[in-house]
Image (spheres, rainbow, N blue to C red):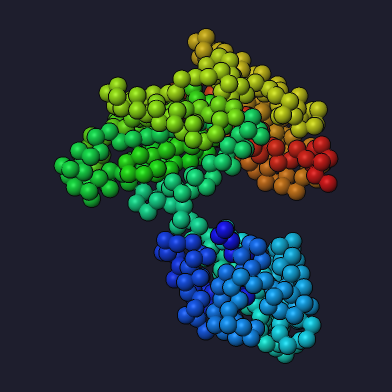
């Protein structure tokens, strides 16, 4: 069994220099450390998840009077009291999230441990000769400073690992690491979730006729056009080669189809650089309740295959199953359906949330029944008034409940209202469609905001946060 490194006993300057050399490594931090340790003069060792050391520098082994510490635990390597101190420091750092400085019982060594959160490494331990008392505070401050630099290095490494170098989009590694969390969130909150798979039509012909450099330019420009047409919540991923994928949280399949058509037009309408005419084919699948990632992906991939087989430059959706996302069901799979899981525990807030769902559905009915523009404008004005009043009532309630992020939540409200009024102005001037306005008001301002940001303060309203 391969053990995940859990902590280090190390020389600070060595770690900082070593991390700097790892940014372009294709291997994980654990393997990079293991390869580098035998060549260092620092006192460094890597401890695995099971508490056993995976590898160390010769200096570390000599410190303990051993030829090697591989496979050994702290209890094997250190006196009992010192091993207990190491365990105590590790526990305190995990609980408190900041560095801890202690002397081991014999006072021969000073132990400093501070956190380093990463998939491979979760803590850092420093073993040094004791310094004069007046120097200890500075030593600890230096350790904290170095730890912040380490954290930034880790963040940089994670960003590099999750980003496609050519297009700057997220990459397959990122999606495969995060998709299961997104599925779990959708299950827990009973939210719809859709995926789009995008393939560039006749991309091999572009490469063959104009060269791979031109092909790379097309992929970069395509990524930019897709970003410009996507919503803030959508996640664009380069899946591989000329294939991209878009993950659409809180989005039922019908809405994802409309988004896919918008993407298709954004690509096909205007020529690319070098006057190339580029088109894309798209396959869409809304995730069904309880559906794992692989079969969900395969349904979208099958839809993409149909789009390619039926002539390309088109959108195809997976066949609809009634299990899909009943939170956004009924007419056109877009009506908002209230569920008990959405209740906050505050009667007034819950009543207003349900009322907002109701008027949103009235607006949808008016749109689908093709009522007059004036009639729809009246419903929009009423919805905006109700939303504005609800935001005020909600802000008062969360302030009274002691929600610590109340000011930030009020700022989110202000931003949503500002966007809503700006979109309404564009609608009145004929620059925005009714569909755009409904999508933003009903799904962004009401449903998505309530199912995401509002859920954060529910424990304060119902008293479960204590």
Q: Position of residue 64 (x, y in %)?
A: 65, 83
Q: Quadrant of residue 276?
A: top left
In percent of the image, x 58 and y 61: which residue is there?
A: 3
Instruction: Judge left or right: residue 201 versus residue 75.
Output: left
Which quarter of the figure has residue 222? top left
Q: Residue 148, percent across and down?
A: 60, 68
Number of numbered discs = 0
Above or below 62: residue 169 = above
Picture residue at 47% right of the left edge, 80% below the top: 39
The relative height of residue 44 versus residue 291 in the rendered view (above or below) is below
Please identify the residue farthest to the bottom as the structure is shown.
132
Q: Position of residue 149 (x, y in %)?
A: 56, 69
Q: Is residue 260 visible?
A: no
The quarter of the picture where the N terminus appears is bottom right
User: Closest to the observer: 252 or 399?
Assistant: 252
Quick check: 34 above or below 187? below
Foreground of the two, 220 or 173: 173
The answer to which quarter of the image holds residue 363 is: top right
Q: Residue at x 83, y 40 (%)?
A: 463
Q: Is residue 173 above or below residue 157?
A: above
Horizontal side of residue 76 vs 422, given as left or right: right
Q: Residue at x 40, y 43 (%)?
A: 239
């Amino acid at each position: 069994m391969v053990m995940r490194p859990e902590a280090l006993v190390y020389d600070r300057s060595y770690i900082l220099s070593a991390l700097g050399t790892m940014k372009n490594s294709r291997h994980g931090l654990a393997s990079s450390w293991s390869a580098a340790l035998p060549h260092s003069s620092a006192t460094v060792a890597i401890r695995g998840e099971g508490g056993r050391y995976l590898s160390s520098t010769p200096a570390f082994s000599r410190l303990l009077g051993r030829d090697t510490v591989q496979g050994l635990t702290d209890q094997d390597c250190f006196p009992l009291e010192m091993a207990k101190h190491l365990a105590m420091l590790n526990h305190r750092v995990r609980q408190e999230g900041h560095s801890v400085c202690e002397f081991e019982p014999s006072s021969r060594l000073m132990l400093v441990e501070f956190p380093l959160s990463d998939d491979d490494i979760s803590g850092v331990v420093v073993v040094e000769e004791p310094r004069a008392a007046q120097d200890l505070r500075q030593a600890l401050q230096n350790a904290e400073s170095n730890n912040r630099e380490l954290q930034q290095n880790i963040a940089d490494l994670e960003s590099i690992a999750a980003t496609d170098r050519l297009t700057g989009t997220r990459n397959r590694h990122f999606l495969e690491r995060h998709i299961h969390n997104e599925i779990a969130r959708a299950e827990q909150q009973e939210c719809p979730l859709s995926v789009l798979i995008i393939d560039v039509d006749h991309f091999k012909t572009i490469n063959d006729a104009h060269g791979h450099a031109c092909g790379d330019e097309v992929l970069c420009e395509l990524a930019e056009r897709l970003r410009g047409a996507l919503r803030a919540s959508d996640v664009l991923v380069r899946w591989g080669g000329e294939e991209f994928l878009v993950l659409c949280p809180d989005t039922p399949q019908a809405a994802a189809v409309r988004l896919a058509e918008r993407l298709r037009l954004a690509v096909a309408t205007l020529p690319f650089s070098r006057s190339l005419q580029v088109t894309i084919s798209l396959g869409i699948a809304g995730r069904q309740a309880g559906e794992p990632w692989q079969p969900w992906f395969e349904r979208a991939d099958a839809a993409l295959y149909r789009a390619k087989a039926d002539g390309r430059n088109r959108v195809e959706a997976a066949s609809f199953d009634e299990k899909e996302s009943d939170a956004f069901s009924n007419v056109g799979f877009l009506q908002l359906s209230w569920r008990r899981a959405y209740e906050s525990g505050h009667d007034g807030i819950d009543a207003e949330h349900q009322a907002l769902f109701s008027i949103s559905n009235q607006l949808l009915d008016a749109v689908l029944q093709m009522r007059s523009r004036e009639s729809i404008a009246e419903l929009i004005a009423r919805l905006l008034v109700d939303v504005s009043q609800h935001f005020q009532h909600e802000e008062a309630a969360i302030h009274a409940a002691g929600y610590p992020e109340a000011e930030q939540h009020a700022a989110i409200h202000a931003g949503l209202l500002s966007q809503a009024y700006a979109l309404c102005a564009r609608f009145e001037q004929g620059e925005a469609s009714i569909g755009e306005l409904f999508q933003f008001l009903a799904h962004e301002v009401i449903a998505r905001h309530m199912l995401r940001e509002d859920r954060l303060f529910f424990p304060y309203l119902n008293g479960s946060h204590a």
